[in-house]
Amino acid sequence: MTNEFIHAPAEFPGLDKISTTAPSDGIERSAAKREFQGLREELVDLQRALFAENKQSLLIVFQALDCGGKDGTIRKVFQGLNPQGVRVASFKRPTETELEHDFLWRIHPHAPGRGMISVFNRSHYEDVLVPLVENLAPRELIEKRYRHINDFEQCLMDHGTTVLKFFLNISKDEQAQRLQDRLNRPEKRWKFEPQDLEKRADWDKYMEAFSILFEACSTTNAPWHIIPSDDKWYRNLVITRIIYQAMKQIGPEYPKSQYDLSGLTVE
């Protein structure tokens, strides 16, 4: 695994101490794009085997602040994979019906079945982030939810699901540029909501809430990966590397035929 991006269970240093940009002495952009394309082709083959084997599964969670790049990452990284074996679920504010149940009720049906990859565009972590920032729930309840989340993810892993969690880490200046781009380009304005500016005003509160979350819910088996995401090409490469390495560890194999096909020909 790409260890430099993993936040293992330990005291979290804070997002303000973690870079949001590609390292200046790292891989060049042209080489990164070539590696990215090659890894994505490998992922296509691994996903076919995962789907055919029908024994294990993969859950990929993306969290970020507004304009963090979740949509673009999903489009780029999973392009070319068999759509029969990939499901993307997006989670917004809970509906009235969802609020009548426990907070994981709306999440569990989207967990991947055998042979499947599920991608969460936002996730169950919204139900601890937003209540903490907006003071919608007592801290005691939020602390319980951290434990419920860890138990939920462990339950999935106990049943053959690998869990990968990515936080797309962008700077406040980068977010400002991307929000302005949405306003400037008519084809992107549908994504903009006035609440985006309200959430931006709470930047420091969200940074603190994410830091608390990473410390509470980064476990040995399901650590958080904090991805520098100001540079989209670098973000895409790092995430694809980690997913590829996880799929290799899963090691899916095409099943053998239950029939004796030796000597059989089609006329």
Image: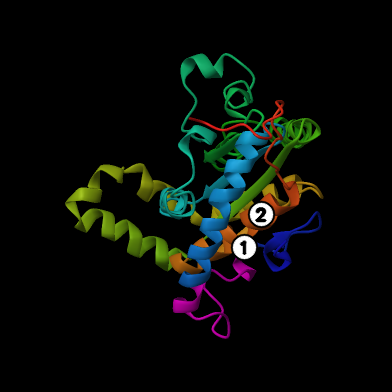
Q: What residue sits right under mark 1 in the picture? A: 15
Q: Is residue 174 above or below residue 126?
A: below
Q: Which residues are magenta?
A: 15-32
Mark 1 Cα-neighbour bin, 10 Å: few <14, some 14–19, many ≥20: some
Q: Amino acid at mark 2?
A: Ser
Q: CA distance from mark 2 to mark 1?
A: 7 Å
Q: What residue sits right under mark 2 in the picture? A: 211
Q: Is residue 216 left or right of residue 84?
A: right
Quadrant of the snapshot with the N terminus: bottom right
Mark 2 Cα-neighbour bin, 10 Å: few <14, some 14–19, many ≥20: some
Q: Is residue 147 above or below residue 210?
A: above
**Quadrant of the rendered structure where residue 117 is?**
top right
Give the colouring mode of the picture. rainbow
Residue 170 seen in the figure = no
Which residue is nearer to you in this view: 243 or 261? 261
Place of residue 192 in the rendered image (x, y in percent of width and height, measured from the top left): 30, 46
Place of residue 232 in the rendered image (x, y in percent of width and height, measured from the top left): 44, 65
Which residue is nearer to you in this view: 181 or 120? 120
Decide whether residue 132 is among the magenta residues.
no
- Circles 2 and 1: CB atoms closer than 8 Å: yes
